[in-house]
Image (spheres, coloured by chain):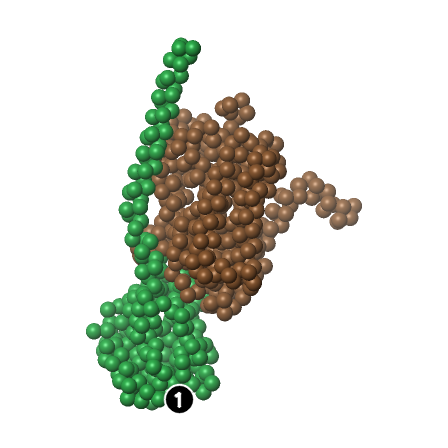
Chain colours: A brown, B green
Amino acid sequence: MNFAVASRQAARRIGFWPAVCGLILLLFAGVAVLRFTRGLGAVTNLSDRFPWGLWVGFDVLCGVGLAAGAFTLTGIVHIFNLRRFEPIVRPTVLTGLLGYLLVIAGLAFDLGQPWRIWHALFFWNPHSVMFEVAWCVMLYTAVLALEFSPVVFEGLRLERPQRIMHTITTPLVILGVILSTLHQSSLGSLYLIVPAKLHPLWYTPLLPYLFFISAIGAGIGMTILESHLSERAFGRHLEMDLLEPLARGMVVALGVYGLLRLIVIAKNGALAALLSPGYEGSMFLLEFTVGVALPVGLLLFERVRTHPTGLVVGSLLAVLGFVINRLNVSVTGMESAAGVHYIPSWMEITVSLGLVAIGFTLFALAVRYLPVFPEPGRRRS
Amino acid sequence: MSVGLLFDSTRCIGCGACSAACKEANDLPLPIEDHTTAYTWTVVEDVGGAKIRRLCFHCAEPTCVSVCPVAALQKTAAGPVVYDPQRCIGCRYCIMACPFGVPKYQWDQPVPIVGKCILCAGRVAQGLPTACAAVCPTGATLFGEHGSLLREARKRIAATPDRYVDHVYGANEAGGTSVLMLAAVPFAELGMKTDVPRQPLPLLTWNVLSKIPSFVGVWGVLLLGIHWITKRREEVSAYEAPQREKER
């Protein structure tokens, strides 16, 4: 038996995606060793002119934004009392918790001295947006862990902690929504300090509002995608009766966001430049088409929204557009002022992909060992 | 009293004594690079015959100080913007945010810190001028009280207007800086940023951050209120349900 046949058989036994995940994680481990022994310069394409790259733009900005489904869904169920959405709260909170843990893992790579991350607790600077984000992310990760804890307690059949958690759910959810509102918007505020560096297609005093609204849209999009992937991976059916109204919420969020973007760009006097787009203009058009125009245009139609494929495609576009937007703010829009072109190194990409792979793996493990999804018989009709 | 520097490009001969003195005074490793890095805090560049020094401007209201999440950067009363490497976590927000592109990072180190000119804060505290000003053979870099340096700069332009462009760089940039510069050609041609806002940049984020406490209060009460109302509605409809059944 030659190697090719053996590896093919092994791959069939393990499965395609787990094999891909394994390969990425192997590379990830290698890059991690290099990163912490040789420094940031050895593994990244970052420089004094371009100090923030993929790890900030994707791992942090997208990681936090795409985890926004958790505060949106818990808010809908526990503050607006729309109890029928309860069956998708647990997997969404799990996605959120994993998202934030991976953001912190990403920071462990990006920060020059991550072992000092606790300094933000003791050395305060209330004038720093980063200081506020650090506190909110830390507190909200704790809130998410508490919001997810009933699932663990249920899995371990611990009655008393479950009851305690039940009584504090509402204040916890309200705290979670407040913290999320603050730091989702503050990730946009991070860029308020660079009016001369960020391209006028993206710079606006409204950045915090835009980041908050787009995070709600993308968070809902992720919730729908995550339901779809769970359907495929764990043989669950798509809860169309719950996801379709969520998609309507997403369309509203994206619509408000898209309109605000256009108004801001018109005010910045950058609208005309889009007729003959350069590098930045093209990237904006890509972002806006994929992330706003197409998903809103498609999901406005009931026939598309109520069809599983249409719903999933619309949500995927919204999420992709969100990712392009965050990379445009953090990379594309900053390049011209920096005077350099930044393309992440393969090692930076490996770390980002590795974090995503870890996320998928942990999600699958949690679903296998914990009651993340409601039992079919227990589901409310 | 706060101190500063006045760099007069027209008096600079590009000898580089300031760079060498800076290395020695701040215990920085050699060699002297051709541009500023985490290890070379000041250089003299030759731009088409004109000389221009690169160094930290020590803003009156520094962007780097406002963005640092752990307050590793501080503006001292004496003028220098100083850096505490023991606090720094390496987020590099200062490098990203500085309107002059001053702070640099030790990209080649596994335990990296930021490097930038600290206006020889230690020497200044002892009443000494900065190392670069002390060694400057032509007086192109002057050390002194900020107010008198600014007056001196304006006086030079007024006395010999054909020698200078009518611009004291640093008088208004980013709300004013402790380091001032004079030159014979427009600063844009010397590779200086001329689109730096005239207002202190920290205001841009403080305008948002300062509203957080009131926002948390209002938002919290609103969310509680919504919960209260929707919960009550649910209870009422649950209570009325059997009665509606009866009436039917």
Is the residue A208 above or below the residue B150 in the image?
above
Looking at numbered disc 1 in the image, what kind of residue is underneath it?
Ile
| Residue nearest the observer in this picture, B86 or B210 | B210
Residue indicated by mark 1: B13
Q: Quadrant of residue B177?
A: bottom left
Q: Is residue B87 above or below residue B162?
A: above
Q: Estimate the x, y position of residue A196 in percent, counting from the top left.
A: 41, 65
In this rendering, position of residue A246 left or right of residue A16? left
Q: Is residue B50 left or right of residue B156?
A: right
Task: Say what secondary structure mark 1 lies in.
Answer: loop
Q: Nearer the viewer, residue B131 or A157?
A: B131
For residue B246, say whether it is visible. Answer: yes
Q: Image point 36% across, 55% down: which residue?
A: A129
Residue A200 in the image: x percent, y percent?
45, 61
In the picture, the quarter occupied by the C terminus of chain B is top left
Asked whether the viewer can see residue A39, the reply is: no
Residue found 51% across the figure and 28% down from its top: A374
A379 shown above or below A172: above
Which chain does tag 1 point to? B
